[in-house]
Image: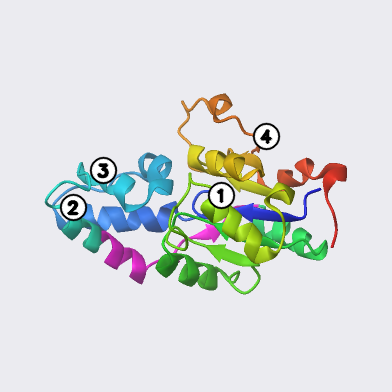
Amino acid sequence: MIKAILFDLDGTFADTAPDLGAALNHVRQQHGLPPLPLATIRPQASHGSVGLLGLGMNVTPEHADFPALRDEFLAHYTAHICDHTRPFLGMAELIDELEQRRLPWGIVTNKPHRFTLPLMQALGYAERAACLVSGDTCAHAKPHPAPMLHAAELMGIAASHCLYLGDDLRDMQAGRAAGMKSIIARYGYIDAHTDLASWQADGMIDNPSKLTDYFGSSIEQQ
């Protein structure tokens, strides 16, 4: 029985790539580099400052310049966290339907809490979510199952009765390890050449509205 729905944030619940991309291009501009197109940035948008600075500035966390570049990136992102970010098309309607069915829903993301909460507040969903579990909420982040299990505990629902939607391999690994039904958000930040079959998910969707296809008779209205 599906009794609750959990979502990844970046690339699943909301399209955050425009604001993350703007922060990266701000850093590039500060260092005399031309902007990267959003289409180039989008596949890395779920991988935070490490993935984005690796793409845009060719640095790893071990590089001497990484801390300063990350500070530049995060300062701009903090100031412009929801200039252009919006829930993906169909997500608002899905959340409305879940709430009509009295099914609790929440967020499990690797995004730090200092960004998760203000972003969800700016989008108008922070108070509606049954839980907001960030990358620094638990001792381990995804792909470890700890954040998933913590979210289930906060909602008072067994993990086996939760469905998780995400757009990254680590999402499926975490969901599977926690015993949750795990679905790929194929509309998210996934490289076109990714072998999604290797993720061993329970299914995949091209639009948030299609998630209800996986409820069927196994959904339990509270």
* Classed neighbour count for the residue bearing mark 4: other residues with Cα under 10 Å, few (<14), some (14–19), many (≥20): some
Q: Which residue is denoted by mark 1 in the rendering?
A: 12
| Residue 155 forms part of the magenta stretch | no
Q: Determine the CA span between mark 1 and mark 2.
A: 27 Å
Q: Determine the CA span between mark 4 and mark 1.
A: 16 Å
Residue range (magenta):
73-89
Q: Determine the CA span between mark 1 and mark 3.
A: 22 Å
Q: SS of the residue at dot 2? A: helix
Q: SS of the residue at dot 3? A: helix
Q: Which residue is denoted by mark 4 in the rendering?
A: 202
Q: Residue at x 71, y 54 (%)?
A: 158
Say what amino acid the circle numbered 4 marks. Asp
Q: Are marks 1 and 2 in contact (CB under 8 Å)?
A: no
Q: Determine the CA span between mark 4 and mark 2.
A: 38 Å
Q: Are marks 4 and 1 in contact (CB under 8 Å)?
A: no
Say what amino acid the circle numbered 3 marks. Gly
Q: Determine the CA span between mark 3 and mark 4.
A: 31 Å
Nearest to N terminus: mark 1 or mark 3 = 1
Q: Which residue is denoted by mark 2 in the rendering?
A: 66
Instruction: Report the front residue among 59 and 38.
Output: 59
Q: Does residue 78 appear left or right of residue 165 in this picture?
A: left
Q: SS of the residue at dot 4? A: loop
Q: SS of the residue at dot 1? A: loop
**For discs 3 and 4, the disc positioned in front in the rendered view:** 4
Q: Residue at x 34, y 44 (%)?
A: 37
Q: Does residue 218 appear left or right of residue 28 in this picture?
A: right
Q: Does residue 123 appear left or right of residue 49 in this picture?
A: right
Q: Mark yes or no: residue 187 visible.
A: no
The quarter holding residue 4 reads bottom right
